[in-house]
Image (tube, rainbow, N blue to C red):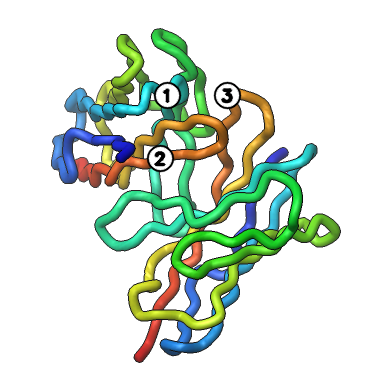
Amino acid sequence: DVKVTQSSRYLVKRTGEKVFLECVQDMDHENMFWYRQDPGLGLRLIYFSYDVKMKEKGDIPEGYSVSREKKERFSLILESASTNQTSMYLCASRSGGRAFFGQGTRLTVV
Amino acid sequence: AQSVTQPDIHITVSEGASLELRCNYSYGATPYLFWYVQSPGQGLQLLLKYFSGDTLVQGIKGFEAEFKRSQSSFNLRKPSVHWSDAAEYFCAVGATEYGNKLVFGAGTILRVKS
């Protein structure tokens, strides 16, 4: 069974902290994505990666960075967390038009 | 620019009633179209997808969707809703090329009343 695992379901961080959200997939997919989901705004793409060490900005990359050192792992980094980054973050991997999503990480920045 | 519009923020239907969730897209080429469901506390699950061929596609859990190019629509339907269908539904569109990215609609929250 395919699996996309996000390391945390819930996180609470303070303003200004550096935050790491980890995502691991076991399907050997090249493409991995980070989205955030906010009420009324649906899913918005933050960054995606189509290969190891390759990344591209999505629609809302400001305030975020990513790391893809290994094929199975795609990390989202909040360099200095702010309250407007409180959201649900979803990781996905994709192959052949099918996307597989993790359970999501609900991040609260206080 | 690519865009997906789900005009209904939330819909309430009675259990056993039929359901139609609307989705309109704007896309410059032949689109890949998807419907996903997100149940409370769960990740996104693919319900169905359309790439080409028959414009009426069947998905899991008894859902179907019809692609209408002339209306730029890809509405999701179910003949008889179950209480377990209560969730948020997302329509998405993507390109045909390798390495494309999906554009999602804002989602429609479905409530089912017994």
Residue A77 against residue B55 in the figure, above or below: above
Please give the name of the residue rendered at 21% of the width and 45% of the height, measured from the top-left corner: A108
Disc 3 from disc 1: Cα separation: 11 Å
- Image quarter hosting the C terminus of chain A: top left
Callout 1–callout 2 Cβ contact below 8 Å = yes
Amino acid carrying mark 3 in the image? Gly
Indicate the chain on which mark 1 is placed: A
Quarter of the image holding residue B41? bottom left
Name the element at disc 3.
loop
For disc 3, the neighbor class at 10 Å (few under 14, some 14 to 19, many from 20) is some
Residue A79 against residue B18 in the figure, above or below: above
Please give the name of the residue rendered at 27% of the width and 27% of the height, measured from the top-left corner: A24
Q: Which residue is mark 3?
A: B99
* A3 relative position to A28: left or right: left
Callout 3–callout 2 Cβ contact below 8 Å = no
Indicate the chain on which mark 3 is placed: B
Q: Which residue is mark 1?
A: A29
Q: Which residue is mark 2?
A: A100
Judge whether residue B3 can be spotted in this image: no
Amino acid carrying mark 1 in the image? His
Please give the name of the residue rendered at 37% of the width and 22% of the height, measured from the top-left corner: A28
Judge whether residue A14 can be spotted in this image: yes
For disc 2, the neighbor class at 10 Å (few under 14, some 14 to 19, many from 20) is many
